[in-house]
Image (spheres, grey):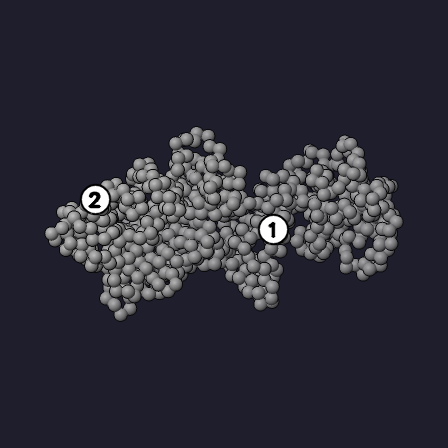
């Protein structure tokens, strides 16, 4: 490569070059280009000019070239929408404004004349009620949480948007919570599709095509009826925490609190009580907890943390990498990117993924949006604490402890799992899933660690809770723990209580056989394990 | 959310239908549609404006102003061109308006090319792949373009960077063809004169002779 600095005297072809740049479709363009090509062979100055233009095309932007990250883009869009909403509407044309102004003037004059003649009569215009469409819009369900990718009628969902009838919500790898009104929240999990069918003064009807819909409503407060249509029937939710699952053509109803009524074609209307599980199409209502119940309780706990109050703040959390778990004040809300309506005030936000986590304390102002981006690539176990951050808040949250205990249990580390369950109960005795944790702890102690006395205490603690959807499982645990401790009258009473409350339990025959054995000459004889 | 690139004429037709429906809904005030359109247009608008504006804050402000203008004007979008093309034209007009306003505000500032003060570079230092060299070249080119009057700046960017014809530039900037032609001629002459006074730029351009 040789270094040839062009002469600065000005090239004879400069004007020609400029003309060529001006218009490539000029009649003499071909000839111009040909003569330029010949000239370039000998003129370093022209070649330098061309290189500068090429450089400018490829590297010439004046501002930053990096595209905005997802959070910044969302923030910009929200600012634009807010500014657009605030901006006064421009009249489209004088031709439209002039007749409208004339009509308004005429109405005002008429009203004034009427008012002059009938001083006690209120002009009709003054009593005009708000249009039904506006009222309906204001009371329509609106989104209070969007985690991951969610679409509404094919478009990306927006937080706080009112959703009208015939709106279809699809959650791919995300989830969404809708405020249906009067404190009722509906959580649609991943890979779900729900459609808002209708909303009247009496009820709201959702159609669940696929996925899981968890509905929570405040206890003891009347709320309008909510119905969920499914491919196999309709579920009317009278309860306060109910989940409806539509998977692979099967429809399951889980009632955690309150009750639900199911209508199916060709069948009488049936009620599903608290703790009940019903697969539509089957005849039997199952009772007793399973892992789904416990997961649902945890989920409901997170959903109930959301707020539909008008002064709720908006929390937007993103992370690198995405799909990290977001826990706010110990309640798991979903995966990043996430936007949620949360009550104003200070909140401890923990974002974690694959062993890396970061914690910040964020202050939400009433009705304002708060953005926070977490970079977990650089985070070790915890990120740099925010100013004024309370170190105690860095302790694991209830949701994290529960998840850790479940993981340890899956890894058959029974003692560590039991210790974690105990730690969770000690740290968060009032948490919504405390009852489910007592049951899980009892299971580990009884079946895996063989600590029968401790297991008995856990099952009894579970049964002391006001809502015990897994009472059957707990009562069985009590009976088995007593049997392991020597049986006798206490075991007999426990089995009788179990059969009285759950006569259809799958272990009924076995338990009755045990009762007979206990009533015989050798009550302490062990029937079997 | 990834968008599949349409490949067949049927796909293109379908994409156009979706876009038309989206615009119609956004113009009617549908929040989701508005959000969707804005998310789609943020980067195209920024990439258009980057050729006119230098600072982050300025770029942010004008991007916002452009998108607000797009939302306001959606009702007049007639589907005769692609949404991105139509938005590009709005971005250019907003940028031109902003540049004129800024020029009036900063009228007392001398925008002539500053004399060369950096030490003359050696050919070995001038590889454009070197981030430092690239940044310096960009800075100098940017300063050079900003010496132009706003109308000339817009015309030359549209012609040389975006490849618009003279007639198209006249339509976008709402001027006559001959006016655009004279603006371009003046802009190119001025750029050439300024560039030839910049030793760094000319050393780079000449240093790549093989």
**Do labels 2 and 1 touch, CB within 8 Å?**
no
* Residue A409 - label: none
Task: State the SS at label 2.
Answer: loop
Camera-side residue of A171 and B60? A171
Task: State the SS at label 1.
Answer: helix
Q: Is residue A453 left or right of residue A44?
A: left
**Residue drawn at 57 percent across, 42 percent down:** B61
Camera-side residue of A3 and A40? A3
**Residue drawn at 35 percent across, 43 percent down:** A414
Q: What is the quadrant of the N terminus of chain A in the image?
A: top right
Q: What residue does disc 1 label?
A: B44
Q: What residue does disc 2 label?
A: A485
**Residue drawn at 34 percent across, 39 percent down:** A419
* Residue B38 pos. (x, y %): 54, 51
* Residue A433 pos. (x, y %): 31, 45
Q: Is residue A499 left or right of residue B32?
A: left
Quick one: label 2, few (<14), some, or many (20+) residues within 10 Å?
A: some
Quick one: label 1, few (<14), some, or many (20+) residues within 10 Å?
A: some
């Amino acid at each position: 490569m040789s270094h040839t600095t062009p002469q600065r005297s000005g090239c004879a072809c400069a004007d020609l070059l400029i003309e060529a740049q001006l218009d490539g479709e000029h009649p003499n363009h071909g000839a111009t280009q040909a003569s330029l090509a010949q000239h370039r062979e000998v003129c370093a100055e022209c070649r330098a000019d061309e290189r500068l233009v090429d450089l400018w095309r490829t590297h010439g932007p004046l501002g930053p070239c990096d595209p905005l990250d997802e959070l910044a883009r969302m923030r910009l869009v929200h600012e634009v929408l807010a500014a657009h909403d605030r901006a006064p509407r421009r009249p489209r044309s004088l031709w439209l404004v002039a007749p409208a102004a004339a009509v308004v003037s005429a109405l005002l004059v008429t009203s004034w004349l009427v008012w002059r003649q009938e001083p006690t009569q209120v002009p009709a215009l003054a009593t005009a009620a708000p249009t039904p469409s506006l009222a309906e819009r204001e009371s329509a369900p609106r989104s209070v949480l969007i985690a991951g990718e969610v679409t509404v009628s094919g478009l990306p969902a927006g937080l706080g948007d009112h959703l009208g009838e015939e709106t279809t919500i699809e959650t791919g790898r995300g989830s969404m919570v809708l405020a249906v009104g009067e404190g009722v929240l509906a959580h649609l999990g991943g890979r779900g599709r729900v459609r808002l069918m209708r909303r009247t003064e009496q009820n709201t009807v959702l159609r669940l095509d696929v996925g899981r819909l968890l509905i929570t409503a405040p206890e003891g407060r009347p709320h309008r009826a909510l119905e969920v249509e499914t491919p196999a029937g309709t579920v009317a939710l009278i309860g306060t925490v109910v989940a409806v699952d539509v998977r692979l053509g099967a429809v399951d109803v889980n009632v955690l609190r309150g009750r639900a009524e199911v209508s199916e074609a060709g069948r009488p209307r049936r009620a599903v009580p608290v703790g009940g599980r019903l697969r539509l199409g089957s005849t039997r209502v199952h009772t007793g907890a399973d892992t789904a119940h416990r997961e649902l309780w945890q989920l409901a706990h997170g959903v109930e943390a959301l707020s539909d109050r008008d002064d709720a703040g908006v929390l937007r959390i993103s992370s690198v990498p995405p799909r990290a778990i977001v826990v706010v004040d110990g309640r798991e809300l979903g995966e990043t990117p996430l936007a949620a309506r949360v009550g104003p005030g200070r909140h401890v936000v923990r974002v974690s993924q694959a062993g890396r986590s970061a914690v910040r304390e964020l202050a939400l102002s009433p009705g304002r949006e708060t953005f926070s981006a977490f970079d977990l690539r650089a985070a070790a176990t915890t990120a740099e604490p925010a100013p004024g951050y309370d170190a105690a808040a860095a302790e694991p949250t209830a949701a994290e402890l529960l998840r850790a205990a479940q993981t340890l249990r899956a890894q058959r580390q029974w003692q560590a799992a039991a210790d974690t369950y105990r730690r969770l109960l000690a740290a968060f005795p009032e948490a919504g899933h405390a009852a489910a944790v007592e049951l899980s702890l009892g299971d580990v102690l009884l079946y895996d660690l063989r600590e029968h006395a401790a297991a008995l205490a856990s099952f009894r603690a579970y049964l002391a809770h006001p809502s015990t959807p897994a009472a059957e499982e707990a009562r069985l645990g009590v009976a088995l723990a007593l049997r392991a401790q020597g049986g006798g009258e206490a075991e007999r009473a426990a089995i009788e209580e179990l059969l009285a409350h759950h006569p259809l339990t799958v272990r009924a025959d076995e338990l009755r056989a045990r009762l007979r054995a206990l009533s015989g000459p050798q009550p302490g004889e062990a029937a079997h394990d | 959310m990834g968008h599949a690139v349409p490949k067949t004429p049927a796909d293109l037709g379908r994409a156009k239908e979706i876009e038309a429906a989206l615009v119609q809904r956004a113009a009617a005030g549908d929040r989701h549609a508005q959000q969707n359109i804005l998310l789609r247009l943020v980067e195209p608008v920024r990439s258009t404006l980057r050729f006119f504006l230098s600072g982050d804050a300025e770029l942010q402000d004008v991007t916002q102003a452009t998108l607000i203008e797009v939302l306001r004007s959606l009702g007049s979008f007639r589907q005769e061109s692609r949404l991105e093309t139509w938005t590009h034209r709005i971005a250019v007009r907003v940028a031109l308006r902003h540049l004129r306003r800024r020029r009036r505000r900063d009228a007392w500032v001398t925008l002539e090319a500053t004399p060369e003060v950096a030490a003359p570079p050696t050919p070995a230092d001038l590889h454009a792949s070197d981030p430092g060299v690239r940044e310096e070249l960009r800075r100098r080119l940017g300063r050079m373009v900003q010496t132009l009057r706003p109308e000339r700046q817009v015309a030359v960017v549209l012609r040389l960077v975006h490849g618009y014809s003279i007639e198209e530039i006249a339509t976008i900037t709402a001027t006559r063809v001959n006016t655009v032609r004279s603006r371009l001629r003046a802009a190119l002459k001025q750029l050439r004169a300024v560039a030839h006074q910049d030793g760094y730029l000319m050393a780079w351009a000449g240093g790549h002779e093989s």
